[in-house]
Amino acid sequence: KKPGDWFTLQLGVYPILVTMGKDRVIRAFHNVCRHRGYPLCIDSSGSAKRRFKCQYHQWTYDLDGKLAFARDFDSELDKDAFSLKPIALESTGGYLFVSVSENPKPFQPLRDICESYLTPFDLKNAKVAHTSKIIEKGNWKMVWENNRECYHCKGSHPELTVSFPDGVWWNGMGGTEEQKKMVKEFNDKCEELGLRSGFDASEDASYRLQRIPLENGARSFTMDGEPAVKTKRLGILPLDEPVGDVLFYHYPSTWNHFLADHALSFRLLPISPTETEVTTKWLVPGDAVEGVDYDLETLTKVWIETNMQDQKLVEANQIGVSSPAYEPGPYNMSHESGVSQFVDWYCNTSVQQLN
């Protein structure tokens, strides 16, 4: 929010520092002192008044990453050669994206799609109402596979299926003719309200955005389908009109839901071959007041329960697939096409990297 604010993130073996400079530009750096490698920031977040000081040997850096001071070094030290190593960072739709690759993919195609869907939500002016963090004892790919289908939802997620539709008819490309007509009418109505609808994905399927209708006229992920935030909406979203859910995934680390009254952001970080950290954030309008505009339990109940249910499924499934006797069965393409697509993306990406 202000210059000097920072947070840290661990991406595999890479510790990362994200901060806002005096010029209000947000930058990302490797959270590694250029002297002996000690992390500049140990905590998860904080605010630096003017500079970052390494607690090991007191090397000190400006907010833009330039080395400002190296104690007891002579004047021949080339400070410009020892700035913090930068990391590619991009921003769109209120989200920050970082890449530790030396040659990250062009970001503009994703920016264009994200902004067309997410600008109406004005997420830059939203606030985090609640954060949960769990460690699932399963490989990160299994966490993704579980997310990319709802074949299991009817039998495992009674809270979620109050509002989230079963099957894949809601994408407008499957289901009965009546369902296809209903989805088209819903999308047309949302477009008339100035809300991007339909289905948009990258050529390599690494990300996708689409708007879907919710079940039974529901307007939010709550136990009765009614908005959790009663009197306020994100951005320019309508107060009463059902506008469904914008789904956004981006492999390998995030899936998201954007509703009129709140948004949900999920982040996956592999910890080991059989452990995955799942962080969930609930975002509400910036001026919404807990206890006045929303009740925290009402806001969070559906996905707290769903996360716990998914955790049990993934952990039990990890035990099963680890058996030497396990052989994969066929996908139900009426429900599990997303899993097949994820596996294809993973295999294709792995081949590209190996080459």
Image (tube, grey):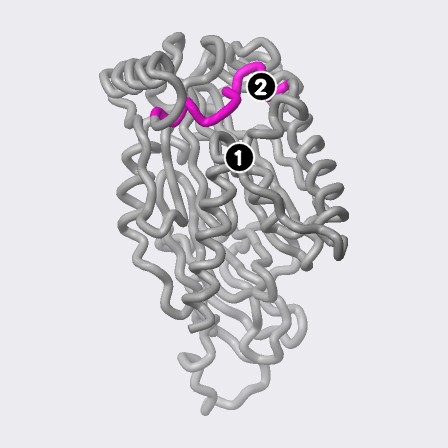
- The correct choice, above or below, for 332 with respect to 83 in the image is above
Where residue 114 sits, quadrant-wise, is top left
Tell me which segment is drawn in magenta.
159-172
- Give the spatial CA distance, label 1 vs label 2: 19 Å
Q: Of marks 1 and 2, which one's residue comes earlier in the chain?
A: 2
Name the residue type under label 1. Answer: Asn
Q: Considering the numbered disc 1 on the image, is that residue within a helix, a strand or a loop?
A: loop
Instruction: Bin the neighbour count of mark 2 within 10 Å (Cα to Cα): few under 14, some 14-19, many 20 and up.
Output: many
Residue at x 53% of width, y 16% of height: 163
Of 276 and 349, the residue lying toward us:
349
* Quarter of the image where the C terminus is located: bottom left
* Residue 205 image position (x, y, % from top left): 38, 47
Q: Residue at x 58, y 9 (%)?
A: 224
Residue 275 lies, with reference to residue 248, above or below; the image says below
Along the line of sight, which residue is nearer the eye, 105 or 289?
A: 105
**Crowding at label 1, few (<14), some or many (≥20) Cα neighbours within 10 Å?**
few
Q: Give the residue drawn at x 71%, y 51%.
A: 326
- The foreground one among 149 and 330 is 330
**Is 257 part of what is drawn in magenta?**
no
Q: Which residue is mark 1?
A: 332
* Residue labelled with disc 2: 161
Residue 312 point in image, percent of width and height: 74, 36
Task: Give the left or right position of residue 101, taking residue 11 as reference.
Answer: left
Q: Secondary structure at mark 2?
A: helix
**Amino acid, disc 2:** Thr
Q: Is residue 45 visible?
A: no
